Amino acid sequence: MVMTVSVNVPSGFADRPMGMQDSYPGFAKRRRVIENRLVDFFDEAGYELVSSGAFEFVDTLLRARPFEAAREWVQLFDGMGNAIALRPEMTPSIARMAAPLVTAAKLPIRWSYAERVYRRTNDPASLSWASGKAAESTQVGVEWIGEAGATADAQVLDLCHRATLALGLQETQTVVSHARLLPALLKALGVPGELVADGLACLTRGDYVAFRAVLPSTLPDVIGILQAVTPYEPDSLADATAGAIWQSETARQEMEAAWGSLVLLASAVTDLGLKEQVMFDLTLHRDITYYTGLVFEVFAPGVGAPIALGGRYDDLLAQFGSAAPAVGLAFEVERVLAVLGAPMTAADTFSAGSLGAAVNHAGGGL
Amino acid sequence: MLTVALAKGRTVDDLLPLWQEAQLPLPADLDDTRALVFEVAWDGYSPIRYLLAKPADVPTYVSFGVADLGVVGKDVLLEQQKELYELIDLAVSKCRLCVAGLPKDFDRRPERVATKYPKLADAYFRSQGQSVEIVPLSGSIELASVIGLADRIYDLVQTGSTLKANGLVVYDTVHDISARLVANRSSYRMKQREISEVVRRLNEAMAKRGAVRQ
């Protein structure tokens, strides 16, 4: 059989800026359907849709994030010479919008949003949605301002789980930690501040090997301790750290407080019947500095990055002029689409038959 | 099913003894066939499927989740910076990332550097306050230095015998490299039972070898 090969692929069409992705019929519609399904679901759950402009003042974003995070933002100057940036996420915008209402004591605030968010990328292949960081992506999420405590945290985890079911995702796993527990544990064990920061950066990258290398070798096996404990068993932390030598009593108390709130959360999660879906991994660390308590990531088979993320940020609203506890979550819509549409959602779905054929074929001595 | 992508060549050769000591199931014919996919049963756990992949492709397979686990050199991980969990330093297949060149060029300012690791090489020379032109090549990097394409090479050095045979000397050692066990972030959560058992057995086997603290 003769194959015809097209040598003269036409060229010279207009290109796109780095990281920008076109969506043709099919994909664009599926994405909008998913967005709508989430917005409707959150609406029924009592979260009203809000929206804001794509640009924020850099100054506004810096109230939420440290200076180093600004490297990832797409920045420019407006006509007045102010530095502005495309929002890298919605939470700072929501906090800015909510602060006047908080001052007027109109609490609680339960809002949802469905927006594009932006960050700088060096990857020309914009289809890093499934496995990495995209320059432009779609987030649908909720923010609940004015409610503190483990019960509210558990309700957010429950909301998130029910949203995954509404999307038709069968198997998901929610991984939960506390933003302050690991830093407090390291400080309590006498690790100097700059090493704590280095260690946490390693864990954010997922590099457990470097984390072990960064910490002083005199330290007990921190990862081993954290992987052995679960707030479903309230005494497990005390048991696992029984032999530890504490260098800082304040840090130890901070660790105990974080653990106490996780234990409350674990019992609230059990009451909601979510124990199967919610696991604790205290080595989970997220790079967002405004989290003060609960942090979580939701995983589904076939996509190597979390499909939903969230956490509690009780100190953020104060940066916008009016203090209030708050908790939120966001779905990464393109990753959800990748899970739903993946030709092989999990390595398992390779049927045994087709695998057998591949093995035989390759074994035939190509 | 747990899918493990192994970097073909030296990494897998050095890894197999450790894998056996860890009593993890292995296919009998891994070395002597040209097959790329192997499936073996694992008592009490779901079966393991092994993929033999080009080292530079292992992080891609793992980050996209077609492999749950991977074993690959740290050099590849450093160059690619994919989103993965790096779980264990397996302390096998050890080598070094080095800057090398002809002895006569040692005192000259570097101008052109041939390498398989353009990002790492660029980062290294910038950290030395030197501005160089990077020449990306995909193999036999030593050749670039010998024939005068580049005055430095930035490459993996195992025993140093290839360098020696070509009259090259090591100027500087930049990173110590060894094989690492990496996991897909979703698989690490969804297949926790299997993966933590692999990790536990490997750690145990390494402890027996008296390797580095884990």
Image (cartoon, rainbow, N blue to C red):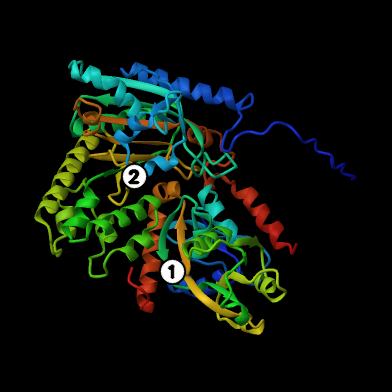
Q: Is residue B160 above or below residue A37?
A: below
A50 left or right, relative to A243 = right
Which part of the image, by quadrant, shows the N terminus of chain A?
top right
Q: Position of residue A106 (x, y in %)?
A: 20, 15
| Residue for point 24% across, 51% down | A182
Element on which disc 1 rests: loop
Q: Position of residue A326 (x, y in %)?
A: 24, 29
Q: Quadrant of residue A171?
A: top left
| Residue for point 15% across, 63% down | A244
Q: Same chain, marks 1 and 2?
A: no
What is the chain identity of the residue bearing mark 1? B
Which part of the image, by quadrant, shows the C terminus of chain A?
bottom right
Q: Which residue is mark 1?
A: B90
B211 left or right, relative to B56 = left
- From this viewpoint, is residue A107 visible? yes
| Residue for point 40% across, 19% down | A51
Q: 10 Å neighbourhood of mark 2: few (<14), some, or many (≥20)?
A: many
Q: In the depicted view, which residue is nearer to us: A363 or B54? A: B54
Q: Quadrant of residue A306?
A: top left
CB within 8 Å, label 1 to label 2: no
Q: Position of residue A33 (x, y in %)?
A: 51, 21
Q: In the depicted view, which residue is nearer to us: A305 or A237? A: A305
Q: Which mark is residue A286?
A: 2
